[in-house]
Structures are given as structure tokens and as C-alpha cells.
Amino acid sequence: MVRFSIYHILAVVITFAVLAVACVVIRKLNRRWQNAVFILVTLVGSLGIFFRYAMSLKWTADFQWFTLAEQMMQVCNFNMILLPLMLIPKNELARQYSFMFSMWGAMTTYLSIPKSWSALEWNDIVIVNFWLNHTMAVALPVLMWASGRLKPQKKYIIPVLACVFAYFTVSAVITKVLLDNGTITIEQTHSFLYSTDGIALFELFYKLIPYPYFYLYPMLPLLAGFFWLQCFALRKQKVQPYSLVRN
């Protein structure tokens, strides 16, 4: 495991401080300005993925759709590309999926450090873009929740779990094809489907089920319990139906 540096600790503290302040501010804004903030956060998060992968962190015309599509099936960036779906008024499932699952997945960035970071300066564009993308994936559902426009609902627990299972399965199949074709290596997948990456919980699962992809199945009942706790903890929160206009 890469050791935490003072820069990483400061980044975590500053990020959470900014999110806390943003939650206070968003509650004081009217619906129009809240929507503007949601749209801005979505654009920053989604476009950051295109900049990182499809444009290789360079503002050039060399836009590679294959590289982007390949990365979507290997890492959590797929969940960030889905951020715009949260802005569709009738797509409550996308908002529930993001709040229950992808937000917490993105938040693990604050606690885990990729080994590749050890050779980079703290302000390297790779780290900044990586951190910013994950923070936007956290910020959008958090701000929607803070503004009273979103809260987890028990009736969406099973649909969200089904989406998680589908995502794991589709990603595993496509990644397996890429591995078999020699297009990528396991080290290039950046995927928990094929590597525990030294995470203690995943290491335990792999000892129980020593097969890639299948070893993550125990995560599903754990996620179900976690989703239920979210719904229970926020059951008394007042929420207004999400829409882009005032009801």
C-alpha cells in the first residue's frame, strides 16, 4: 500500500470541507440555481473522463472513442459517465443508483492511493483530473440530497442491486474478451473484477471464492444491507419530487 502523504491528507480534508460548505449553500439557493449547480458538476465530472481517457489529458483533436469505451468497461468511470442521467426528471433509478452505490465507490478514492501516484507530484494533471472526476461523482448526489431533491428509497434497493450485478457482469465479459485477445493485460484493467488490489475485504472474498469476478458475489448481500441502512437513516428527510422546473 502506498503511504499517505501530507498532500493526500490535506486533499481529503479540503475536499470534505468544500463539500460540507456546498451542502449548506445549496440549501439556500432557489431551484433554478440549484439546477445550474447540478449541471455544472455533471459537466465537470463527465467531461473530465473524456479529457482523461479519450483525449489522453491533452487538448488535441486526437479523440479516441475506442480507448474511452475500453476504459468504461474496466474501471468505475462508467458510473461517472452516467451522471447526466441523474438530471433526467423521470429517471429516478439513475439518482438512486448514484446515491446508493456509485457515490460510495467513487469516495474510496479518498482512502486508497493508486501505486502509479508514487512517481508523480501531488499537483500532476493525472492526479488532479482523477481526484476531480471522483469528487464530482460524490458531489452531485450529495448536493441533490442536501437540497431536498433526493433521498434513498427502499423500493429501489433491488433495482439498484440488479444494475450493480449487470455492471459487474457486462464489465467482466467485455474485459475477458479484451484479455483473451491480448488487447490489454490484467494490470491494465484497473478493475476489481480481476484483481483485489490488496484491499483487505476483497482479499477475504477471494480466499472464500478464488475466482475472478465470482469472488465479488458476496458484495451483493452486503450492499443490500448497506442500501437498507441508508434508507433507514434518511427515512425522515423531507424530499420534493425532482424536476427541472418548479412544481
Image (spheres, helix red, strand yellow):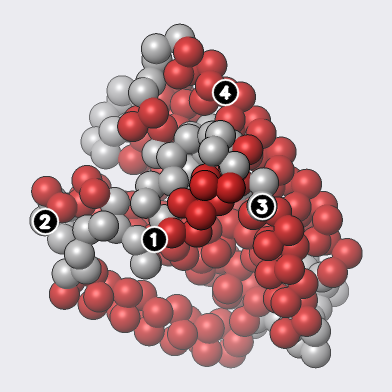
Say left or right for 190 vs 25. Answer: left
Name the residue at the top extreme. 181
Q: Are marks 1 and 4 in contact (CB under 8 Å)?
A: no
Element under disc 3 = loop
Q: Are marks 3 and 2 in contact (CB under 8 Å)?
A: no
Residue 74: x %, y % from top left: 48, 34
Mark whose residue sits in front, 3 or 4: 3
* Disc 3 target residue: 218
Q: Are marks 2 and 1 in contact (CB under 8 Å)?
A: no
Q: Quadrant of the C terminus?
A: bottom right
Mark whose residue sits in front, 2 or 4: 4
* Disc 4 target residue: 174
Residue 121: mark: 2
* Disc 1 target residue: 109
Q: Are marks 2 and 4 in contact (CB under 8 Å)?
A: no
Q: Residue at x 39, y 28 (%)?
A: 186
Residue 82: mark: none
Kind of residue indicated by mark 4: Ile
Mark whose residue sits in front, 3 or 2: 3
Chain-order first, disc 2 or disc 4: 2
The quarter of the displayed image where residue 59 is located: top left
User: Could you give the CA–CA distance between mark 3 and mark 2, rounded to whole angstroms?
Assistant: 37 Å
Depth check: give the residue in front, 13 or 5. 5
The quarter of the displayed image where residue 246 is located: bottom right
Mark whose residue sits in front, 3 or 1: 3
Depth check: give the residue in front, 229 or 137. 229
Kind of residue indicated by mark 1: Thr
Residue 216 sits above or below residue 38 on the image: above
Mark whose residue sits in front, 2 or 1: 1
Kind of residue indicated by mark 2: Glu
Residue 16 sits above or below residue 62 on the image: below
